[in-house]
Amino acid sequence: MNDSIRFILNGEDVTLGDVRPTETLLDYLRLKRRLTGTKEGCAEGDCGACTVLVGRLIDGKLHYEPVTACIRFMGSLNATHVVTVEHLAAKDGSLHPVQQAMVDCHGSQCGFCTPGFIMSMYGLWLSNDKPVRADIEKALQGNLCRCTGYEPIVKAAEQVSHTRPSALFDPLEKTRSDIISRLWAMRNSETISITTVEGRLVLPGSLDALARVLSEEPTATIVAGSTDVGLWVTKQMRALNPVVFINHLTDLQSITAGDGGFTIGAGVTYSRAFQTIAGKVPTLGRLIDRIGGDQVRNMGTIGGNIANGSPIGDMPPPLIALGATMKLRSLAGTRMLRLEDFFIDYGKQDRRPGEFVESIFVPYPAEATKFAVYKITKRRDEDITAVLGAFYLTLDTQGDVNDIRIAFGGMAATPKRARSVENALMGKPWNETTIEAVRAEFDADFQPLTDWRATAAYRQLTAKNLLTRFYLETSGTPAELRRFEEVA
């Protein structure tokens, strides 16, 4: 068993044996290393001012991803390469092309958010040789500028996409082989356990080791991406002890597509899952594009979104509508569970002491199935859901409802199916008269709350209107009723 984590910070190997369970990368960079180019803005992963790159080995290749340092815990960084904005410029002070483009295009206003934009643009520059404007806008979803519009910043990203000097200029490209060798040397299959006066953090070396740790510490907080748990610390000031990190466990990070559906490991991030999911179920791909920004999607996991049990989690309703099942694991073995049965009450899930989510199986929609997901928020991008509705429908040869599954988030204490609405629709003609008649059944299914995201009345009316929208989109309307910019 090891008692320290190892990672690379810019060009330096770092070994730390005194790490608090909830110490954030942002605090470490600013307070302990004085790398103050990484800014603190929102402290909840929304604004992107603290964006850095984290490189990790995936299938033997080195991938760099923008992440938000404010909610990234130090315990999740073992065998990674952390890159801050200070690492981009050459030793003689020459700016990196990404930085120079921001100067040339006047993309920096007050300058506070600029380092975060630079790092997001740098991540795109590394991963996409010829980004179109949609790629640029997606890469910058997780960065907020408080001064003005984004056009000069987008123009800077467009300019730098055409400026690709010799790889020897770029600090990451010219050291890629060396970094890969150093990261391989830092990986091991031993469990890492670090105890400080503020608590204990554990990085299990395997799934069996994870099961043993949770058997011994059934109340431990499991951290995958920390996109939600991070806010428990930065906003609620909660002390978590012990904390068990699982984002390094490769056995949880595979997504495989089979004949009947695809299996998602609990540690698969949204970004890693996107290509497979969008290819098999395009509707889910569009939903993932609206979950946070790139930084959040690079950290957050589908398994974590489910295991957390939030009533406004985006993935459970559509996966419930698709009939997903999940595999739970512990020292006692594994068990399968319908996803909709996992959620019992607010903050309570059917996860026994010592159990963890190992994977989720999602069946493909049948060819004749009509499937839609609607996410309602105050702003379109990077916003928490007020109401999310998922609809799964098959009709018989007469045009009557043969099967219908409707699941909502934001309407109850848990993600929940609209059973009364479903029962009222079964066997009925799929027409406007039927839809108008069953809208009132939502009142029997849901009694939503009023909060700062939406009133109860708004949520109830929205749920009813989403059923009507689904009917219109499945009854001869040639395209989804999406906003123009979404279609374009």
Image: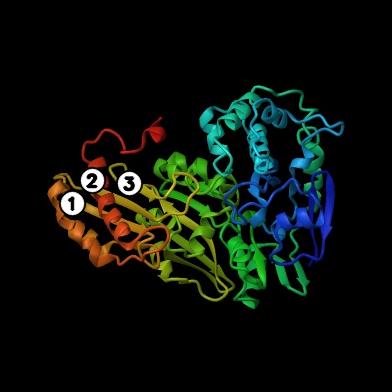
Which residue bears the numbered disc 3? 371
In the image, which disc is placed on residue 393? Answer: none
Q: Quadrant of residue 108 in the image?
A: top right
Identify the residue under disc 2: 471
Q: Name which of mark 3 and mark 1 comes first in the sequence.
A: 3
**Residue 374 vs residue 461, the one in the foreground:** 461
Decide if residue 390 is in sight here: yes
Other-residue count near label 2 (Cα within 10 Å), few / some / many at <14 / 14–19 / ≥20: some
Q: CA distance from mark 1 to mark 2?
A: 8 Å
Marks 1 and 2 close (CB-CB < 8 Å)? yes
Residue 19, by quadrant, is bottom right
Residue found at x 14% / y 56%: 437
- Tag 1: amino acid: Ile
Res 474 visible? no
Could you tell me how far apart the alpha carbons at marks 3 and 2 are, in whole angstroms? 11 Å
Q: Is residue 14 left or right of residue 466?
A: right
Residue for badge 1: 435
Which amino acid lies under the numbered mark 2 shown in the image of this protein? Answer: Tyr
Left or right for 1, reference 446: right
